[in-house]
């Protein structure tokens, strides 16, 4: 789907968030910008600690930010000093990784899914009908209304969490690793469900995952994050077949299952994400990058826009030919 010319539903620009800790300031988000169109799925990938959950908290109004703007359906939030937790918003909702901790164990399914509806005045039989309908949408029958979370399987719990998130018909669903706590077969069912729900309602997804197979299955575009920055973004097919940033390439090489015909041409990513307190100078990825030069270590790479919606932050972007040149024999064993 080519949605880059459609007006955005979500537009994030120059977002910065610093955690001030005893050990120093952590730049969890360091100038993050991206857009999501109506009905589009943007996947956000990156190693643990790169700032994905912080981004989710700022989008949901659960955490303040230090600079930048977040516009959702034309409503713009800017950074401000007298920030207080925002009231729950109808247009964006969230599904977290672990349904066990996100569902109140003392509440029955009817109340869990019904709670957001009650906040807008839905009561009694209308509430039960609406909750039953939402249960149906996520593939669960009315017999689930009276059950408690502990009486459900992990997959059923996550279906309930999705039904609750959809209760107020949000324009956007933020999914923070929604399947990574589930068995593989259950994961597949939930992903299929999410795809079907989107086809029906045109809801947008911001899908956070480190499973590139999931990105391939579900997303239109992908944004690759590294230490608080988006280092590459573009349509999934372009980025996966022809990555520009060496970090994206390394992530892809670490997962040979995406394209079994593709040979592993480079050692998978090694080394750890540097401490966000003592960031390397220049490009944050340079200490782990086999192509880094003195320029990369001295200055921050500019944003390169190859075409609309296809950007990367790198002084020495890869190209198909270049990858071959630098990695030697194409006959090298995978
Ligand atoms: P991810 O979800 O990609 O793993 P996070 O957003 O959780 O990343 O974290 C980004 C960085 O911010 C990490 O270095 C993490 O240690 C730090 N961080 C996250 N939450 C807090 C917090 N409440 N206080 C201080 N540092 C935090
Ligand atoms: Mg996280």
Image (tube, rainbow, N blue to C red):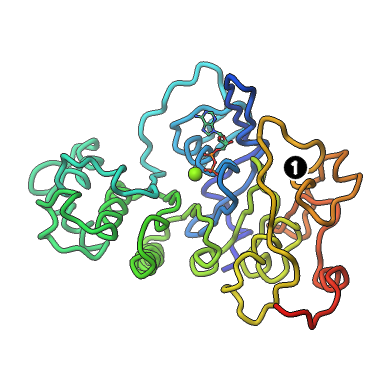
Q: How far from the left and from the top, in percent, is residue 243?
A: 72, 64
The x, y position of residue 73, in whole percent, is: 49, 44
How many marks overall? 1
Instruction: Residue under label 1, please give it.
Output: 284
On screen, residue 116 versus residue 196, left or right, reads: left
Q: Is residue 73 visible?
A: no
Displayed quadrant of residue 84 = top left
Mark 1 surroundings: few (<14), some (14-19) or many (≥20) residues within 10 A: many
Image coordinates of residue 25 in percent, x first then y, are 64, 24
Q: Outermost residue toward the top?
A: 82
Residue drawn at 19 percent across, 56 percent down = 152
For the question of whether residue 304 can be seen, the reply is yes
Taking 16 as reference, is 292 left or right?
right
Residue displayed at 45% across by 49% down: 176
- Quadrant of the image containing the C terminus: bottom right
Q: Quadrant of residue 16?
A: top right
Determine the quadrant in which ligand 1 lies: top right
Residue at x 31% of width, y 49% of height: 99
Farthest residue, direction right:
294
Q: Is mark 1 within 8 Å of ligand 1?
A: no
Position of the N terminus by quadrant: bottom right
Between residue 211 and residue 192, name the one nearer to us. 211
Residue 241, quarter of picture: bottom right
Q: Secondary structure at mark 1?
A: loop
Instruction: In the rendered view, tell whether residue 123 sits above or below residue 8.
Output: above
Give the side of residue 183 with respect to residue 279, left or right: left
Where is residue 240 drawn, in percent x and y?
65, 67
């Amino acid at each position: 789907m080519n949605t880059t010319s459609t007006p955005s539903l979500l537009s994030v620009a120059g977002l910065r968030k610093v955690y001030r800790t005893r050990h120093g300031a952590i730049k969890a988000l360091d100038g993050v910008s991206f857009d999501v169109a109506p009905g589009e799925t943007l996947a956000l990938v990156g190693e643990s600690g790169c700032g994905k959950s912080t981004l989710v908290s700022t989008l949901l109004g659960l955490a303040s930010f230090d600079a930048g703007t977040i516009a959702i359906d034309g409503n713009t939030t800017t950074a401000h000093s007298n920030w207080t937790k925002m009231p729950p918003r109808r247009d964006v909702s969230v599904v977290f990784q672990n349904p066990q901790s996100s569902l109140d164990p003392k509440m029955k399914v009817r109340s869990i899914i019904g709670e957001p509806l009650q906040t807008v005045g839905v009561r009694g039989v209308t509430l039960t009908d609406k909750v039953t309908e939402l249960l149906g949408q996520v593939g669960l029958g009315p017999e689930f209304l009276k059950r408690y979370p502990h009486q459900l399987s992990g997959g059923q719990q996550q279906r309930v969490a999705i039904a609750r998130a959809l209760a107020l018909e949000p324009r956007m669903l933020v999914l923070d690793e929604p399947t990574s706590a589930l068995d593989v077969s259950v994961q597949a069912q939930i992903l299929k469900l999410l795809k079907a729900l989107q086809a029906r309602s045109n809801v947008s997804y911001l899908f956070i995952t480190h499973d590139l197979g999931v990105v391939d299955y579900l997303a239109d575009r992908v944004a690759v994050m590294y230490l608080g920055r988006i280092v590459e973004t573009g349509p999934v097919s372009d980025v996966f077949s022809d990555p520009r940033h060496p970090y994206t390439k390394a992530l892809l090489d670490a997962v040979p299952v995406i394209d079994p015909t593709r040979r592993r041409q480079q050692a998978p990513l090694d080394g750890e994400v540097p401490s966000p307190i003592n960031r390397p100078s220049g490009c944050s990825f340079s200490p782990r990058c086999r192509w880094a030069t003195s320029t990369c270590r001295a200055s921050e790479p500019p944003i390169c826009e190859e075409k609309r919606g296809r950007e990367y932050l790198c002084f020495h972007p890869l190209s198909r030919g270049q990858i071959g040149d630098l990695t030697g024999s194409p006959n090298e064993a995978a």
